[in-house]
Amino acid sequence: MGTITSDNAGAINPAARAADTHAQAKPAARETPTGAARALPAEPLVTIEPRRSWAAPDLGELWAYRELLYFLAWRDVKVRYKQTALGVVWVVMQPLLMTLIFTVFLGRLARVPTGGVPYPLLVYTGLLPWTFFAAAVTQGASSIVGNSGLITKVYFPRLIIPAAAIAARLVDFAVAFAILFGMMFYFRVGLTRQAALLPALVVLLALLALGAGMLVAALNVRYRDVGVVLPVVVQLWMFVSPVLYPSSLVRAAAPRAFRLYALNPMVGVVDGFRSALLGQPLAWAPLAWAAGLIVALLACSAYVFRRVERSFADVI
Amino acid sequence: MRPIIRAEGLAKQYRVHGAEPTYRTLRDALSRTAGAPLRLLRRAARRPRRETVWALDGVDFSAQPGEIIGIIGRNGAGKSTMLKVLSRITEPTRGRAALYGRVSSLLEVGTGFHPELSGRENVFLNGAILGMKRAEIARKFDEIVAFSGIDKFIDTPVKWYSSGMYLRLAFSVAAHLEPEILIVDEVLAVGDAAFQKKCLNKMQSVGEGGRTVLFVSHDMNAVTRLCPRAILLDRGKVLRDGAAHEVVSAYLGTDHGASAARAWDDPALAPGNEVARLRAVRVRDEQGRVSPAVDIRRPVGLEIEFEVTEPGHALAPNFHVFNERGVNVFVTNDLDPEWRGRPRPAGIYTSTAWIPGNFLAEGTLIVGAAVSTLDPTRVHFFERDAVAFHVVDSLDGDSARGGYAGPYPGVVRPALRWTTRFEAAGTPPEVGAS
């Protein structure tokens, strides 16, 4: 481009300029550069060029940044628990109060059939995965815009941000689990062998939250009214998922419509949690469908996110 | 040696704000999609043209391992965009850059610092954000805290920190990064200068080969002080690339509309009257070369060439030197005994006034040139902004700064002779017997 090349400047030895900082500084503070440059790698570590529109996420890079994921999630948790005066109390009270209210209105007054399970346990086993999911998706959605300070100043795989926001919610999730075990003890309901499914279910739920969270996070950067629409969608989604009632209610009332109903992956997941915790027979078909759907969603979201992430710093 | 950074034709296009919002609403997008078939019919009618601008427009450069390069240029010249592209915050529209080393970018001090978290927690968080491993931060933690000098408050939330403490802690984390390539924005322009210099030295000198540092700044003195090499960007292109003091003075020269030498070839346009007329003014270094930048330690000559057209007048050429702030640093009159008070024959005269080294302060100096008759006073011409030059201190340690890297006030900067009388503590005063 007609510019002066830098080769001449290469002759200047920067090591010769390690001047002392301050008249008062100790002379020992001066490091002695050896001048012998370490060998450069044959291939560039980083190549910067315009990317193809649709590229697969770089899993190796994500793995390399796993500690950042941990720190960002840790920050979210720490700040949240520090900022609210009630801290943990609020995390404990929220699902308990919801359970109490639903028990009074749906359990006692509307008499939702529970198949012999105490209603508080039924609703809590539904609220447990649902509350995590709803909070994770909502947090994930606002995470990119909320961390614009990082995005415009430092490079790292942007996927880390919604992933960390979702991971931070796992702490609340764990607290909620502790409450559940307290309730089960109170209602004298023990865990069965089916509880062995729980880790897999937690992974599935977290992946679903990640898939949905990534997608809305990417959309939220482009379309700022996603934040307005999302709570409504989440609310509606709760009612079409077996959170406040058992899915058997739908199956019994409308066997044909149940197929349509079970397209919602949260049906399989919430049912799965409930069965695993309360030792009820597990409906494999909706769960298998949910698992398949979650993998597909995750892949789609990852591609969409990667396509949009290139412009984050320019758009935010 | 092979370069550690090689950039070829880097270009970045931005859509101009205002022409179209950068983000839209879902509602608009949906209604637009719904209306798409309709619009297809009348597409030919009007299609809004997108206003774009090339913030970077084909930048080529390479950097050797261990080089410290200052990136300078006016606002909007593309400096920040270049740093953002090289630190992978934003993608180039065209071009390619290959980096043969790990990169850390410091475009802000304390990126990710959270006010609610303690100093200790923020060190870990900020370190991780800047690309350090947890084990690495843990290993360097004590060193980082000691470097910052705020160990007493390390467990206090940073929201209670003074801005100085905040910066020191943030800088300390940054100074302990160990990338091969460090990209630093204006951030270093804040905070106390001695600490900044300490950080830059630390960043550059730790490790085997020394870091390669790209440093964007508006502070020309800092660039000449810290960087042996500079790149001048202008409208997204590399305008100049070379030794920092040359690039800086080229930049400042264009800025002030003045250069180190100016000649008036056409006598009709030259300043002057029937007695004397200006022909040229030049700034020369010790070796007699015309030079826009001079080392603060070396003498500099101001040269005036003028023609006397009417003989018989006693003439005194004189210079009026102003600094960047418009302060008249000094006025000097020709005291050469050979011509002092003596009527001059017609002809061309070239007079030089030598300013000693270690006298002027760093910065740009603007020289006014005049020829006068002193008694009775008559000014034949006075060209106020005739030439300009730049005094640079490369901070090699033997200038009047004495190694101090911070802002150094004063209109002049003489290196004075100091004497000290010393009496060792505890020595009893001699009691005279007499």
Image: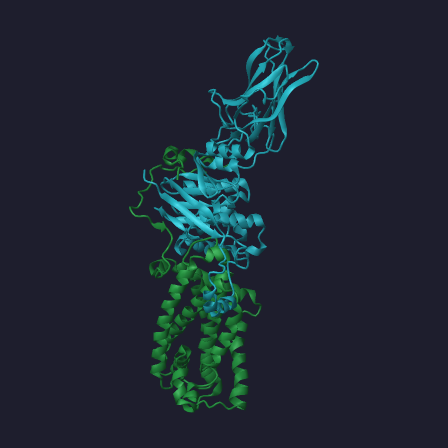
Chain colours: A green, B cyan
Q: Is residue B356 visible?
A: no
> Between B2 and A177, which is closer to the camera in this rendering?
B2
Q: On the image, which quarter does residue B37 sit in?
A: bottom left
Q: Is residue B296 visible?
A: yes
Q: Is residue B58 left or right of residue B336?
A: left
x, y (%) of residue A173? 45, 73
> Between B269 and A148, which is closer to the camera in this rendering?
B269
Residue positioned most to the left: A42
x, y (%) of residue A280? 38, 86
Residue positioned most to the right: B376
Q: How many marks?
A: 0
Residue located at (43% from left, 59% from top):
A309
x, y (%) of residue A19? 46, 34
Whether B320 is drawn above or below A4: the answer is above
Q: Quadrant of the N terminus of chain A?
A: top left
> Between A161 and B167, which is closer to the camera in this rendering?
A161
Residue located at (42% from left, 47% from top):
B11
Q: On the image, which quarter does residue A54 sit in?
A: bottom left
Whether A295 is drawn above or below A46: the answer is below
x, y (%) of residue B299? 52, 22
